[in-house]
Image (tube, rainbow, N blue to C red):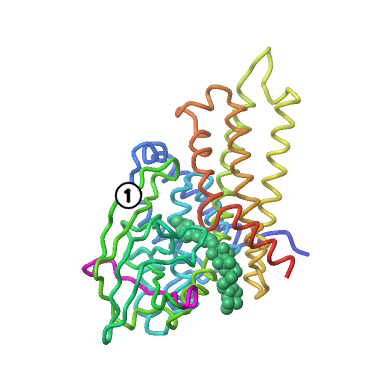
Amino acid sequence: MEFRLNEDQQMLREMVRQFAEKEAQPTVAERDEHAIWPDRLVAKMGELGLLGVAVSEEYAGAGLDYVSYAIVIEELSRVDSSLGVIASVNNSLCCYGIEKFGSEEQKRELLPALAAGRALGAFSLSEPGAGSDAAAQKTTAVRDGDSYVINGVKNWVTNGDHADTIILMTMTDPAKSYKGITAFLVDTKAPGCSIVKIENKLGIRSAHSSQMAYDNYRIPAWRRLGEEGQGFKIALTILNAGRIGIAAQALGIAQGAYEAALNYTKVREQFGKPIHEFQAVGFTLADMATRIKAARLLTYEAAWRKDNGLDYIKDAAMAKLYASETAMWVATKAIQLHGSNGYSKEYPVERFFRDAKITEIYEGTSEIQRLVISREITK
Ligand code: CAA
């Protein structure tokens, strides 16, 4: 068994770490405070190949494996988890979906720009009435000659307000329930697609999540992803891979919060000594480090299984479940170790705490991950 990253993966980690620390760190608090979309940093991520990590080179991607992809998202999120999710949505919810399910025409037309950062991608499944129950789609697509006409409202579209291409789930045949769901590759510049509002969020504030409306939005039939009725399977297959990205994001948040706490407990003195010398503090740091290591092993193993053509639905769900609950736990403890300073925006741990929460919710709540895991282990 090999537990070491190869040389390329180690170099990639170093490169992303340098980028995150030098370019994202100085502005992360301000962008979080004012919910500023990181235009310049998204462009730079594109130049560095971080938006198409696992996309094949023939479609202008970096052509790397999913372990490398997990490393990228982890390192971005260790400093700025908004960047982590922007990259994750483009990589695994949009590019991966197009490369796996798209026609050659769709791949050639859309992937090179998305993978190189000249365009941005999003994924749109959630609706006001369809969250965990993703099959309850109300957005309709009706065939009309060589196109479809789409009407409905979608919410929680991460990257939505900056996206060029969105993988959109619609209902084409309500009588067939989830077998009536069809996916499309939306061109957001075409008329009829608009932003209703950008959510004012607790965390990952620099990454925008929008509510979007489709009002007689006409889309040419060549932009249908897969066949009619395949949309639910496509959405869940994309989410299986996406969950590795969110596990990696949670891992990065946990690592960032842990490092902040570790450094703080070495310099903060009370009762005449650095507080890490108190057993209660040292044991907390030990628990943090142990949980983070377990989350990393689960996350990398799920990515490795995907890279090696093995089943990974259960493993991605386990990684996402454990890493997200670890991020929340570690960030909570990191604040506690900072005392009242941890409650202040002068220190980064309150941001990690706010950012961690969403990882237990999006791309399937912890309850949905437990449902997926329990179904997989009992079938
Ligand atoms: N992968 C692939 N296919 C799957 C699957 C999976 N993980 N889980 C189920 N399926 C298939 C089943 O095999 C079945 O297909 P067949 O009939 O062909 O066999 C079909 O889907 C229906 O399955 P179920 O009867 O199990 O469906 P269900 O409705 O009982 O449960 C669910 C499905 C697991 C609850 C699913 O709805 C789910 O994962 N919900 C969570 C939705 C979610 O993650 N939303 C995230 C929104 S995106 C987001 O968050 C973006 C962002 O901002 C970053």
Q: Nearer the viewer, residue 167 or 285?
A: 167
Which picture quadrant has residue 193? bottom left
Residue nearest the viewer, comparing 335 with 171: 171
Q: Position of residue 135 (x, y in %)?
A: 49, 67
Figure quadrant, ligand 1 = bottom right
Answer above or below: position of 279 versus 324: above
Residue 207 percent location from the top left of the image: 39, 50
Residue 113 lies, with reference to residue 200, above or below; the image says below
Residue 187 belongs to magenta span: yes
Where 307 falls versus 254 (above or below)?
below
Q: Is residue 146 left or right of residue 349?
A: left
Secondary structure at numbered mark 1: strand
- Residue position marked by numbered label 1 in the rendering: 198
Residue 85 drawn above or below residue 109: above
Q: Determine the residue located farthest toward the right in the rendered image.
A: 1
Which picture quadrant has residue 42? bottom left
* Residue 80 seen in the current view: yes
Residue 251 in the image: x percent, y percent?
A: 60, 49
Q: Which residues are magenta?
A: 176-192
From the top left corner, tell me how far across and down residue 140 is, in percent.
35, 71
**At 65% across and 51% down in the image, what residue appears?**
322
* 121 with respect to 1 (left or right): left
Front residue of this view, candidates 130 and 324: 130
Residue at (53% x, 57% y) in the render: 72
Q: What is the quadrant of residue 125 in the picture?
A: bottom left
Q: Is residue 134 magenta?
A: no
Outermost residue toward the top in this view: 271
Left/right of residue 290 with respect to residue 186 in the rendered view: right
Drawn side of residue 271 relative to residue 138, left or right: right
* Amino acid type at mark 1: Ile
